[in-house]
Image: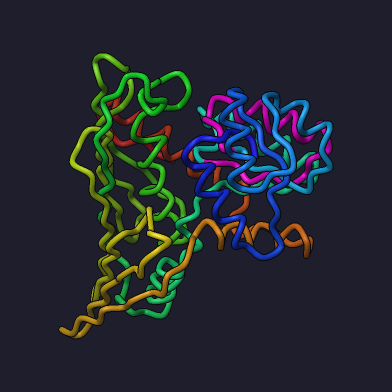
Amino acid sequence: IVGCGGISSLHGKASQAAADVRLVSCCDLRTERAEEFAKRYGCDSQYDNYRRMIHEQDLDGILLATWPNQHREQVERCLDAGVRHILCEKALALTGDEAREIRDLVETAGALLMEGFMYRHHPQWQRARQIIAEGGVGELRTIQTAFAYYNDDGQNIRNIADIGGGGMMDIGCYAISLARFLFDAEPDRVVGIVEYDETFGTDRLASAMLDFGRGTSTFTCSTQLSPYQRVNIFGTTGRVEIEIPFNAPPDRPCLMWHETGGEIEQIEFPVCDQYTIQGELMSRAILDDTPVPTPITDAVANMQVIEAVFESGRSGGWVAL
């Protein structure tokens, strides 16, 4: 694992419970943080330079828990060192062009790369997709998503524009991903309004609509609003509401409501860790030589929509995809 920050701790804990997964080495520019991480999660070694790690360790795969501005170079160096299996934290890149470059590198190397959208693997999302596929809401018509937190710390990396900070790259990407996941299609066009922080230069409030032709998806994401997340899925005969759609807790059940025919069914999902599930799925793909659940083409498509929202925010009109 490269990067030993907060998201890495979730992966570290998950790896301890995952079948066919063993975290063997970690790297962070801050030596003391790498040492603490290695001790906490049982790594055999730790480094302050990932280039040394990927050349000195015999690795089956690597997790890039770093920021988007680093992914292009890190993926290329990992592939050059013979590491053929990569789980990369979102967003895949800073731009659509970079995302396509990463895709080309991975495909040329015959490697596997999966973007770390862990939410998709949680049973609540698998069930939501099943309900829609089986006509449980009639025809899917629209999705409404809210995802926000409050962070005005100028030293926090989420408020540093050059490395991929801001609401769209951090959390708006989830709203885009889930819409594409549920519609099982790419939007024809998007329109968005984006507000930027005058000090940080990062997007702090964004609202957008994705037009899929047969339905729409709207969302608001913000780094400076009261913390909240919720997804509502509406069809012609029913709806699905997901209480905690993204940061599903690993220590208590998750709830979903399915309404149809005037009746509301509350669905409770047993305790599970979506990071553990993600790690296990990635490992099975490596061991069985099968495709990863979400291929790199999905990551490239998500990045293209993110860019289109930003472009619409600048132009004030619809952007075709």
20 w.r.t. 225: above or below: below
Q: Is residue 70 within the magenta segment? A: yes
Q: Quadrant of residue 257?
A: bottom left
> Where in the figure is residue 36, as x and y percent of width and height?
58, 36
Question: Relative to residue 8, is residue 309 drawn left or right?
Answer: left
Indicate yes or no whether the magenta region holds residue 41.
no
Looking at the rendered structure, the number of numbered marks drawn on it comes to 0
Q: Quadrant of the C terminus?
A: top left
The picture quadrant where one finds residue 260 is: bottom left
- Residue occupying image coordinates x 33% and y 47%: 210
Q: Is residue 75 left or right of residue 98?
A: right
Q: Is residue 182 above or below residue 315?
A: below
Return the residue found at the far top: 199
Query: Percent x, y for residue 174?
Result: 40, 48
Q: Name the residue: 64% across, 42% down.
A: 63
Q: Quadrant of the N terminus?
A: top right
Please report the residue visible at 22 percent of the width from the left and 33 percent of the height from the top: 224
Vertical relation: 19 (above or below) 269:
above
Task: Say which of 279 and 242 sits in front.
Answer: 279
Magenta residues? 65-89
Q: Residue at image x 54%, y 25%?
A: 69
| Relative image position of residue 119 (x, y in whole percent) | 45, 57
Q: Position of residue 96 (x, y in %)?
A: 53, 32
Q: How is the image coloured?
A: rainbow
Residue lying farthest left?
Answer: 262
Quadrant of the rendered image containing residue 245 = bottom left
